[in-house]
Image: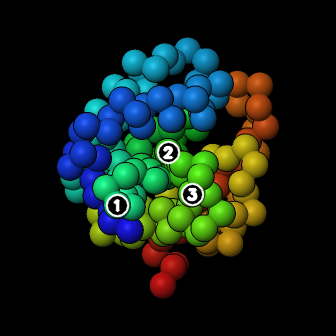
Amino acid sequence: MTLLPLSHRPDTLDTIARWHFAEWGPLYPNETLADFRRGLVESMVVGAVPGTWLWLRDNDVVATGSLLAKDMTTNAELSPWLANVYVVPSWRGQGIGAAVVKAVMAEARRLGLPRLYLFTEDQQGFYQRLGWALHHRERYHGVEVSVMVCELEELT
């Protein structure tokens, strides 16, 4: 597997925007596919927040992960966020999701970030196994979500 910033593969932008919109569009009812694409374009910087990374296998993107300054319309005081952890369905169940999360966390540590937040509908246990803790639960756009935190300085 190869890890690359999205800026190194701009040809994948439209495909990734479609994946993300299909996966999480209902959690962002006021956003369109074009908004998702615009967010990805903004995350094409290297060495900064926002940033998006791709995992490639034989030149094909099999997963994504991002660091964002903001990921919810609530919790404006919390930042930055791990987001866009997406694994192509045919590649799921092989540990790629955990590798994505760990790699983005490592990027965050390199940037000197002390902690990260994320929110998930149904993957709280997965993230807890990777060192994340429940911050709080809330109803977000009609869906129960867990907002989680990871103190990066405490991880080895």
Is 155 situated left or right of 107 in this image?
right
Q: Nearer the viewer, mark 1 or mark 3?
A: 1
Q: How is the image coloured?
A: rainbow
Q: Label 2, label 1: how many angstroms apart (C-alpha)?
A: 22 Å
Residue 130, placed above or below residue 68: below
Q: What is the residue that sits farthest to the bottom in this orientation?
A: 156
- Label number found at residue 58: 1
The local crowd at label 1, few if under 14, some if 14 to 19, many if 20 or more residues have their Cα within 10 Å, is few
The local crowd at label 3, few if under 14, some if 14 to 19, many if 20 or more residues have their Cα within 10 Å, is few
Q: Which residue is mark 3?
A: 91
Residue 100 in the image, given as x and y percentages of width and height: 48, 62
Q: Which residue is mark 2?
A: 84
Q: Nearer the viewer, mark 2 or mark 3?
A: 3
Q: Can the viewer see residue 18 in this picture?
A: yes
Residue 36 in the image, given as x and y percentages of width and height: 43, 27
The local crowd at label 2, few if under 14, some if 14 to 19, many if 20 or more residues have their Cα within 10 Å, is many
- Residue at image location 68% in from the left, 72% down from the top: 129
Which numbered disc flags the more N-terminal residue, 2 or 3?
A: 2
What type is the residue that disc 1 sits on? Asp
Q: Can the viewer see residue 49 in this picture?
A: no
What type is the residue that disc 2 sits on? Asn
Q: What is the residue that sits farthest to the front in this orientation?
A: 58
Q: Quadrant of the N terminus?
A: bottom left
- Residue at image location 77% in from the left, 25% down from the top: 142
